[in-house]
């Protein structure tokens, strides 16, 4: 018996080394992707981080960060960014949750049909959708025309090139990001729980709030988080629908580079934006796993 | 009707009548989700300089404008070329890395996964100015190569997530069976595993195409010169005035997207039998 183990041992270690090598080789399959991300994304962003600490005179300084704290205009930009993000996320929850709830209770075939109304805008180009809202909301646009002919208001309202227009566009663009994970979470709920709740005497309202809603929170949380993070760094929609009145961090970064060629200022704002995003993700990751966030709470 | 209003709508015994508001709300929301985009289509066939709905006089002048302009045509070529190349690069690279991450049990797999999805988490503007800087050093600014590389990086997380989740639902022992019967690993992958996850692979390829085709912010910085993309030119045109040619281009883009979506649905349906 002891002899057999003795003869097996070298074989066993050999297999183990083989296994380890094989695993490393398999892992190597991901190296092209990693190399690309490293060269195109990680290293340049690292360089921006470095540049953000270089002052106008070419030496190490914190002036790029000081500017953000001291100058009113910069503070206002951060406040606007948060305002837009919070409002958009809130509106998406208020509009998206009931719709997801509605769809989750339909028979499958009908639900799939309704799901198309969410997927169609989701797949359509962001720029096209932003343009569509620009056309609809402008002074002579359809919304104003119809509202006036219906007598809702008397003269054309200014609903684009300002905060209102930005929010309308942003909510429209972000809604699918909220609806899809919430819908997924709702579909996964075992309906028997609700039956049990009402069987035990819960009113519909109570059954919803104490049984159904808590079960959907992971999906809701993941969706809201996704929307909020996307909003923080959003550029196209506020740039087109905001008409220069809604200036978000990403827009200031672009104008710092395009107009003022000020890499230091742009980088510092970018770094702050990135850190905000990462902190939010980090806090969220204490409640959800990262792959749950990316796959929408499931 | 009255009976229907009083009948229970769900397991909580709420009646249809009690939540009529939900139905009305949901239908209005669904209409609002879809119509803004679709209304651009009839508008693009208007003869008027001012986008009107319904158009007084129909015409295809904005389409003629688009197809007759060398500038727009060049941009469309760049966009399509970039999107196809991005799809062709991102799909194999992403599938290989999803497979690698799935099968190798090295301890740092989770860290590698996090790194793979960073392009989804880093704000696009930062990716854009970072790539702009890097491309100046690498001397590939304003080239299709540069665009394809940047768009590949943006598409990779999607490919890895979609293919990765398909691999999670796939029984790896099938591949092991093929290997125990003597197939080398690559052969087992191509003949046994790949055919079973092919729908996820096709879906991720379509996603990669659309990611590139629709991308604005990064293209704003690293495309230009002789190779501006369609979206870059559209964005610049939007900042100036509301040119109805954009409506025509938008309609064409909606058409491309719809075709992609239908393809994805077809493949998606077959995915879950």
Image: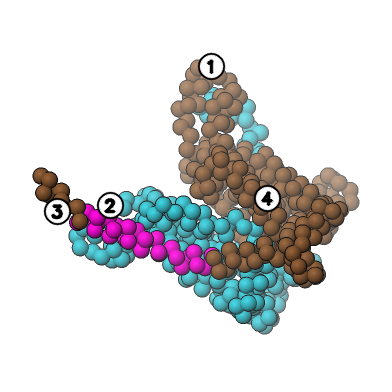
Q: Which residues are magenta?
A: A11-37
Tell me the subunit letter for badge 1: A
Q: Are marks 2 and 1 on the same chain?
A: no
Closer to the observer: label 4 or label 3? 3
Tell me the subunit letter for badge 3: A
- The residue carrying mark 4 is A276
Mark 1 element type: loop
Query: Is A194 located above or below residue B115 in the figure?
Result: above
What secondary structure is the magenta-colored segment mainly?
Answer: helix
Closer to the observer: label 1 or label 4? 4
Q: Are marks 4 and 2 on the same chain?
A: no
Which badge, 4 or 3, is on the more N-terminal residue?
A: 3
Q: Position of residue A123 (x, y in %)?
A: 58, 58
In terms of depth relative to the viewer, which is nearer, A285 or A219? A285
- The residue carrying mark 1 is A201
Q: Is residue A67 visible?
A: yes
- Dot 4, how many residues are within 10 Å of its Cα: few (below 14), some (14-19), or many (20+)? some
Q: Mark 3–mark 1 contact, CB under 8 Å?
A: no
């Amino acid at each position: 018996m002891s002899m057999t183990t003795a003869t097996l041992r070298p074989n066993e270690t050999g297999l183990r080394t083989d296994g380890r090598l094989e695993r490393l080789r398999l892992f190597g399959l991901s190296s092209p992707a990693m190399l690309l991300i490293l060269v195109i994304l990680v290293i340049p962003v690292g360089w921006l981080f470095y540049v953000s600490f270089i002052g106008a005179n070419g030496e190490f300084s914190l002036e790029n960060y000081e500017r953000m704290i001291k100058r009113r205009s910069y503070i206002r930009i951060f406040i606007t960014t948060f305002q837009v993000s919070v409002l958009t996320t809130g509106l998406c929850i208020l509009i998206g949750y009931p719709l997801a709830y509605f769809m989750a209770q339909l028979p499958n075939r009908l639900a799939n049909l309704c799901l198309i109304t969410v997927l169609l805008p989701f797949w359509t180009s962001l720029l096209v959708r932003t343009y569509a809202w620009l056309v609809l909301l402008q002074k002579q646009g359809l919304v104003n025309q119809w509202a006036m002919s219906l007598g809702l208001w008397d003269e054309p309202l200014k609903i684009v090139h300002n905060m209102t227009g930005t929010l309308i566009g942003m909510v429209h663009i972000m809604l699918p990001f909220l609806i899809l994970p919430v819908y997924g979470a709702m579909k996964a709920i075992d309906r028997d729980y609700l039956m049990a709740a009402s069987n035990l005497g819960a009113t519909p309202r109570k059954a919803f709030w104490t049984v159904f809603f808590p079960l959907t929170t992971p999906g809701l949380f993941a969706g809201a988080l996704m929307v909020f993070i996307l909003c923080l760094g959003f550029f196209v929609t506020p740039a087109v629908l905001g008409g220069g009145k809604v200036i978000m961090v990403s827009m200031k970064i672009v104008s710092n580079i395009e107009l003022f060629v000020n890499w230091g200022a742009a980088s510092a704002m970018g770094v702050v934006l990135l850190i905000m995003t990462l902190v939010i993700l980090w806090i969220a990751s204490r409640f959800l796993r990262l792959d749950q966030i990316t796959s929408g709470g499931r | 009707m009255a009976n229907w209003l009083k009948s229970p709508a769900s397991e909580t015994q709420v009646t249809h009548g009690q939540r009529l508001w939900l139905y009305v709300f949901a239908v209005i929301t669904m209409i609002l989700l879809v119509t803004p985009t679709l209304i651009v289509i009839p508008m693009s066939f208007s003869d008027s300089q001012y986008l009107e709905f319904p158009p007084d006089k129909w015409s295809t002048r904005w389409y003629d404008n688009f197809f007759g302009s060398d500038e727009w045509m060049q941009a469309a070529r760049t966009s399509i070329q970039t999107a196809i190349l991005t799809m062709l690069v991102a799909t194999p690279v992403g599938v290989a890395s999803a497979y690698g991450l799935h099968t190798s049990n090295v301890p740092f797999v989770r860290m590698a996964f996090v790194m793979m999805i960073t392009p989804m988490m880093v704000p696009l503007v930062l990716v854009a100015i970072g790539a702009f800087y890097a491309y100046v050093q690498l001397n590939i600014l304003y080239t299709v190569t540069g665009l394809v590389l940047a768009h590949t990086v943006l598409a990779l997380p999607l490919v890895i997530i979609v293919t990765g989740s398909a691999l999670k639902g796939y029984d790896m022992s099938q591949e092991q069976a093929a290997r125990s019967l003597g197939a080398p690993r690559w052969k087992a992958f191509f003949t046994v595993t790949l055919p079973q996850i092919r729908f996820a692979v096709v879906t991720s390829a379509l996603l990669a195409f659309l990611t590139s085709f629709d991308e604005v912010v990064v293209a704003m910085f690293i495309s230009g010169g002789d190779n501006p993309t369609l979206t870059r030119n559209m964005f610049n045109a939007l900042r100036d005035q509301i040119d109805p040619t954009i409506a025509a281009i938008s309609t064409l883009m909606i058409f491309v997207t719809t075709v992609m979506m239908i393809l994805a649905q077809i493949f998606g349906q077959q995915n879950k039998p």
